[in-house]
Amino acid sequence: MSPRLPAHLVDELVRRTLAEDLGLAGDLATDAAIGPEARGTAEIIARQAGTIAGLHVGLAVFPAVEADVTATAVVVDGDRIDAGTVLARVQGPTRALLTGERAALNLLGHASGIATATRAVVDAVAGTGARTIDTRKTTPGLRALEKYAVRCGGGHNHRFGLFDAVMLKDNHLIAAGGIAPAVAAVRAQVGHTVHVEVEGDHLEQVAAALEAGADSILLDNLGDDELRTAVELVAGRAITEASGGITPERAVAVAATGVDVISLGWLTHSAPRLDVALELLP
């Protein structure tokens, strides 16, 4: 299981999420209807089967609303759960439980939906040797959480941003005058530990990327036969990454071509959220 998100990232994410929901006036309904002395216990329940991610992030919402809240997880991130599973219990001022409810469920449901979708692909391609990874097509402000959720689902992360690896895409290659000059310019500027990947959308570019010394080659929107040919051409001299319009149904066929990595943008930008609910106990 991947290490949890660092506390400072969780705290900032929770702060921004609550600020968005509470605005300048706070929780009008709860503050008016519920007395400050009321206390309660609630359970967070999964209404669907899936893989859990971001539970510690969601639970961090409640003590951020009111310090006098105890939140106890029943499962851990990465667990596969059935519909009806109790995920956590929270106890404390009823106002805090109700005010934090939607923010907590939004974070937990979104992350768990990504983990569930990732797990389905990882299971489907198991035994092929292909890794399932995400992309930078993430929700602004939620990248750390979304990439963490991919790891909870058994997937792996592509680069986190523009700062931790080189990806020379089609527009870079056009502006730089081609693959060879683009790779040469990058190698002259970045350190020897920086990974360099080149995007190619036809087999001639694959050969050029190999000749230029790319560490990875992104095989963009190639058919299965072309992917197979590209893998044979590379012959282990670089990491091969298939990307572009790969649906869950097609992932198995793509993995069977022998590529090392399958990158799927929809894992973070389109995975449906897992249905989770908070139920206040009598």
Image (cartoon, rainbow, N blue to C red):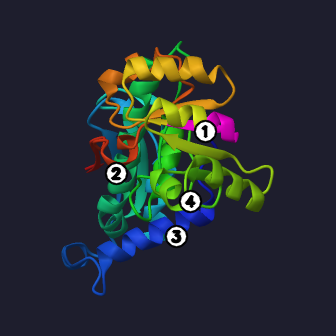
For the question of whether residue 71 can be seen, the reply is no
State which tag comes first along the sequence, 4 or 3.
Answer: 3
Residue on which the image places disc 2: 42
For the question of whether residue 194 can be seen, the reply is yes
Camera-nearest label, 1 or 2: 1
Report the magenta residues as a range.
209-218
Position of residue 7 measured from the top left corner of the image (x, y, whole percent): 61, 61
- Which image quarter: residue 234? top right
Residue on which the image places disc 4: 176
- Which image quarter: residue 182? bottom right
The local secondary structure at tag 3 comes to: helix
State which tag comes first along the sequence, 1 or 2.
Answer: 2
Residue on which the image places disc 1: 209
Residue drawn at x 31%, y 77% as measured from the top left = 22
Q: Which amino acid type corresponds to the residue marked 4 in the rendered image?
A: Ala
Q: Which amino acid type corresponds to the residue marked 3 in the rendered image?
A: Glu
Q: Residues within 10 Å of mark 2 (few under 14, many from 20)?
A: many
- Which image quarter: residue 151? top right
